[in-house]
Image (spheres, rainbow, N blue to C red):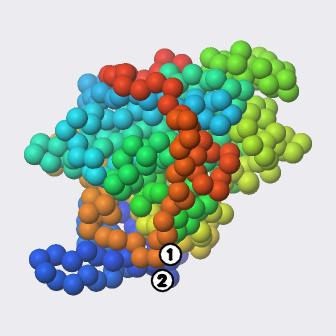
Amino acid sequence: MGACLSVVLFFAKHTRLHVADKPAKVVLRPKFGSTSTTIALDQLVKRLCPAVLRPFVTPWWLFNGHLQTAYCAMGDFTKVNVVEFERTLLCTADGGTVGLDFTPSSETAPDAPILVVLTGLTGGSYESYIRAVLEPAYRSIQQGGLGYRAVIINFRGCSGVPVTSPYLYSAGCTSDMRAALLHISKLYPAAPLLGLGFSLGASVLIRYLGEEGNRSRIKSACVMGCPWDLYENCEYFTRNWLPCQIYARTMGQNLQRIIQLHAEQLSTLPAAAAAVSSILSTHRPTLKEVDAVVTTLTGSARAPFPFPDRDIDSYYRWASAQPHMDAIRVPVLALHAADDPVITITPVNSGIAVSPWVVFAVTPGGGHLGWFARRGDGSLGRWFVEPVLEWLRATAEEMDVPGLAAPREIVESGGVLREDGIDHVECRVISSGGSTLVAAGSAAVIQGL
């Protein structure tokens, strides 16, 4: 039976949806004088996001997850989906700096939906998987786009963002995201916010949604390649030598390079100087080795950092997004490729109960953030673009979420924004308005992860 099922899955081309026994219901807005109706999330996807269920057809030369992932990392995407951003730098409560890259806004309505994007481990606005969605999302309706605004939250030290405190970022810390949301919400108070997270950024986004529940500033979200269980996914690399050598070490080296670029500032934390020196002297470290030595110490300015006894397994369990899934109260579409060689453990294949608010869509192929497929005209494109755009439009324009409470009040004093009741989250603008044409990746890291 198991062998037969494996054969069926191998030849399957369609996406499979996985939902809770009783999916959450949302309200469809009335049209042409009709009354509003409620609809379950899985039915919403089938009705308003039909592209997610269309066949996923890979080109012959990208027939498995390793090739898809490699092409995402090594392909030349500098001439496609070219986007010009306007960068704003925010100073946070601990003196750190977060970089926000906004799409051009001169022709975008102030109440247009805003796509809030969180990148992969060491990524940035330059990532091809981000630009693939952003370019049609912010393009005007007259030109065939959605006419939305978009902003990418670049992690500290990534994509040209300076490190100005002894602390970096981590999967378990949502403070920088919260600071960014304060600024965005203050700037565009009438605009609904839609979340889009990739890999590590997806994990941070899910954690935020769980922490906030029905008070989330994000109205809906789509996550791709989310490492739901950091501990189990890391254990997979520990047990499998070849994936460890390829992926765990590549991600570790990427993070090592970010640390190297900002070693002087990170070393101003007395306890971090030896840790930074140690990891920079390590040849081809795995991600777990970097996290154990540096992230458990500098992943946040707040408790539980430095993590007790620098216990990496405890850190991974604490930082995982999966325990926060049950507290989510807004619609989430989670895309995952069955052959993703980086994220091998998900709630779907590990038997974890799925949240009523999360719809999992699992494709038979696509690798890690690849999803390269043949278009109808024979050209190569990213399969996920159309499903994601449909989801964004449906959740922004076609539905309302029942039972949501007002987000926490934003308090402003002397140019500093704070969230009422949360003393560790604040931001002030350092600089804004600089235009940056982003197409090529950072020379410091391998893109696509």
- Of the residues shown, which amino acid type is indicated by label 2? Lys
Name the residue at the front extreme.
414
The residue tagged with tag 2: helix, strand or loop? loop
Residue occupying the point 29% across, 30% down:
83
Residue occupying the point 38% across, 51% down:
189
Q: Is residue 367 above or below residue 275?
A: below
Out of 268 and 203, give the one closest to the viewer.
Answer: 268
Out of 14 and 84, give the one closest to the viewer.
Answer: 84
Q: Is residue 314 visible?
A: yes
- Near mark 2 (Cα within 10 A), the count class, few <14, some 14-19 or many ≥20, is few
Residue 81 at what x, y percent from top left?
26, 33
Q: Provide the residue designation for mark 1.
A: 356
Residue 130 at what x, y percent from top left?
38, 39
Residue 352 at what x, y percent from top left?
62, 70
- Of the residues shown, which amino acid type is indicated by label 1? Pro
Residue occupying the point 57% across, 31% down:
91
Q: Is residue 360 visible?
A: no
Quadrant location of residue 263?
A: top right
**Is residue 47 found left or right of 440 in the rendered image?**
left
Q: Provide the residue designation for mark 2.
A: 22
Residue 239 at what x, y percent from top left?
72, 47
Quadrant location of residue 68?
A: top left
Separation of marks 1 and 2 at Cα, in angstroms: 6 Å
Q: Is residue 289 above or below residue 54?
A: above
Q: Do the residues bearing badges 1 and 2 touch, measured as CB atoms within 8 Å?
A: yes
- Near mark 1 (Cα within 10 A), the count class, few <14, some 14-19 or many ≥20, is many
**Is residue 386 found left or right of 91 in the rendered image?**
left
Residue occupying the point 37% across, 22% down:
434
